[in-house]
Image: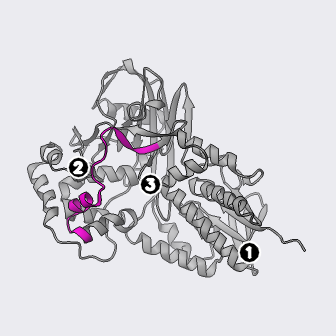
Amino acid sequence: MEQQNKKIVVVGGGITGLTTAYYLQQKIKEEHLSIEVKLVEATHRLGGKVQTLNKDGYIIEKGPDSCLSSKTEISRLAEKLGMEDKLVRNRKGTSYCIAGGELYPIPGGSIVGIPTQIAPFITTSLFSLSGKMRAAADFILPRSQEREDQSLGKFFRRRMGDEVVDHLIEPLLTGIFAGDIDQLSLMSTFPQLYELEQKHRSLIAGIKKSGQAGGSNEEGNFLTFTGGLQSLIDAMEASLEPNTVYKSMKVTNIEKEISDDYTITFTNGDQMEADSVIVTTPHHVLQSMFPSYPFLHFLKEMPATSVATVAMGFSQEAIKKDIAGTEFLVSRNSDYSLTAGTWTHKKWPHTAPEGKALLRCYLGKSGDETIVDLSDDHIEQIVLDDLSKIMEIDGPPDFTIVSRYKNSMPQYTVGHRERIQSMYDQAEATLPGVFIAGSSYDGLSIPDCIGQGEKTVSKVLDYLNEIF
């Protein structure tokens, strides 16, 4: 009697789900496994927040635009896809922070806003003398006594003082997480900083001794692809087995059967059977698919922030007063609606045609999300008004592209790691064969999501090997 193929269904075609399906199918081919993998996505396209628009010679990222080069997941995936030659590093340039309405260069050697080089920190005008002296107390302050989770704000304020946090660390972290640092979890975002503090006592000394400080002045720390991040999505999708991707198929329910396999039901009434299900959707969607499991109810209360990106193209001749830099952050005590901005044509020269300028600005943060719901015209005017405070632009942009991401930035609040681990444990006990991964759970960045996909492949194959 011929052995029947085992069936895995991956729910969610964002970067985590797509990576998981891709690596699964590659592993199945390499090891000649009798397993079928299907990928189902509720929308008409794969990639989730990763989306690149090619327009008039511009390469415009509507969502994330790059990955930290120190995280190797993106390079490994590019190599697997034969895209190593398409990877490009950013061009380094001056980064600024707007505090109190003034534009200040960020001191060289800052790591997550923590100074690691003395001279740039002493000479900067971003902080007062008392603020600098308070930050220097990091060298003599004792280690944190807390063994449990704490907020990023509490941790950094204790080590560096309020001024350095408010003028630099908080704006930088807002750009990463779009959240309130006094609510965000240290152990779910920067556990390595807690470990450095525990080992070296001083956070500054710990970063310096760990080798994280310094680096080349010419070579940037971020990677993208010459064709934009969408090219990574397209390459993975093209590498999937034919007829294994189902788009515009929204899952309404996943039911565990007596036989420990699963029935997946879609909005149109269609159903799909699976021996194992990998769910990579946002947390609120996950909870709605398993409504009768109380251990997932906490996900309904897990916050997520709405953000928007605004890309504008200009002729370089229209920029009458330019800034010799690549990006800026905005502190909360400044009269700006923007949270950050990038002179993309300088940071990533391949993204704009010769003689053109590409600016990309960011809106939306915890406590200030209604701005995302304004009309495109209104948002364009807000961005232009803010930009006019730091540079002079003559005339309207050639184009403006507003991209909104509603409730798209999951917030890892204090205790997140423990809650998620408990969820994993209970899922393993009560929903054997269901695996959960994605940006809501164990890392927001593209490399984090790729890494979750890699780990999930190992877990699901081990599970199927055990039960069959």
Of the image marks 3 and 1, the number of the one nearer the N terminus: 3
Disc 2 vs disc 1: Cβ atoms closer than 8 Å? no
| Quadrant in the picture for the N terminus | bottom right
Q: Closer to the observer: label 2 or label 3?
A: 3
Question: What amino acid is found at the position of numbered circle 2 in the picture?
Answer: His
Q: Amino acid at mark 1?
A: Asp
Q: Amino acid at mark 3?
A: Lys
Please give the residue where the numbered disc 1 appears in the rendered image: 261
Q: Residues within 10 Å of mark 3 (few under 14, many from 20)?
A: some
User: SS for tag 3?
Assistant: loop
Residue that lies at the very extreme toward the top in this rendered image:
317
| Front-most of residues 261 and 382 | 261
At which x and y percent is residue 139?
15, 63
SS at mark 2?
helix
Q: Which residue is mark 3?
A: 71
Mark 2 or mark 1, earlier in chain: 2
Real-space Cα distance between discs 2 and 3? 27 Å
Front of the two marks 2 and 1 = 1
Q: Is residue 378 visible?
A: no
Tag 2 near tag 3, CB within 8 Å: no
Question: Residue 205, image x and y in percent?
Answer: 21, 61
Question: Separation of disc 2 and disc 1 at Cα?
Answer: 53 Å
Q: Is residue 218 left or right of residue 357?
A: left
Q: Which mark is residue 167?
A: 2
Q: Is residue 200 within the magenta segment?
A: yes
* Magenta span of residues: 198-223
Q: Quadrant of residue 348?
A: top left
- What residue lies at 54% left-to-right and 74% top-to-bottom? 424
Is 48 located above or below residue 401 in the figure? Answer: below
- Mark 3 in CB contact with mark 1 (< 8 angstroms): no
Q: Residue furthest right?
A: 1
- For the residues labelled 3 and 1, the Cα–Cα distance comes to 36 Å
